[in-house]
């Protein structure tokens, strides 16, 4: 009995094969250590960049309101 060809399954199998090849290359020492060091450093810098955005947003939220806002004036009515 022959199976029906499925493009979706064919692509999924191909993607899985590529992922396994990359995993083997990384774990098997195919990539140089210097490359791995640079990639670790770049991931760290990426996270630090987002942390600086979050810190700035938190400071802006916690900062006291600006005194340039108009205040209501009390008027005495007789």
Image (spheres, rainbow, N blue to C red):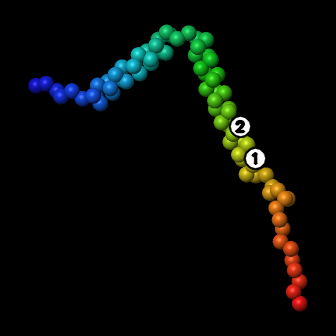
Height in image: 62 above or below 16? Answer: below
Image x and y of residue 56, in percent: 73, 43
- Residue furthest toward the left? 1
Q: At x 87% / y 80%, what residue is drawn?
A: 75
- Which is nearer the eye, 77 or 35? 77
Q: At x 58% / y 14%, what residue is drawn?
A: 35
Q: At x 41% / y 16%, what residue is drawn?
A: 21
Height in image: 33 above or below 72? Answer: above
Height in image: 77 above or below 31? Answer: below
Image x and y of residue 51, in percent: 68, 37
For mark 2, what is the residue? 52
Q: Is residue 42 left or right of residue 13?
A: right
Asked if disc 1 and disc 2 are in contact, CB closer than 8 Å, the reply is: no
Indicate the quadrant containing the C terminus: top left, top right, bottom left or bottom right: bottom right
Q: Quadrant of residue 2?
A: top left
- Which is nearer the eye, 47 or 70? 70
Q: Is residue 42 left or right of residue 12?
A: right
| Helix, strand or loop for disc 2 | helix
Q: Is residue 37 left or right of residue 3?
A: right
Q: Quadrant of residue 19?
A: top left
| Helix, strand or loop for disc 1 | helix
For mark 1, what is the residue? 59
Q: Which mark is residue 34?
A: none
């Amino acid at each position: 009995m022959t199976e029906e060809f499925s493009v979706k399954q064919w692509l999924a199998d191909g993607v899985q094969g590529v992922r396994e090849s990359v995993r083997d290359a990384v774990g098997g020492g195919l990539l140089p250590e210097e490359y791995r060091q640079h990639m670790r450093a770049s991931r760290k810098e990426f996270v630090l960049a987002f942390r600086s955005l979050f810190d700035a947003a938190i400071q802006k939220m916690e900062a006291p309101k600006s005194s340039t806002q108009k205040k209501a004036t009390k008027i005495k009515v007789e």
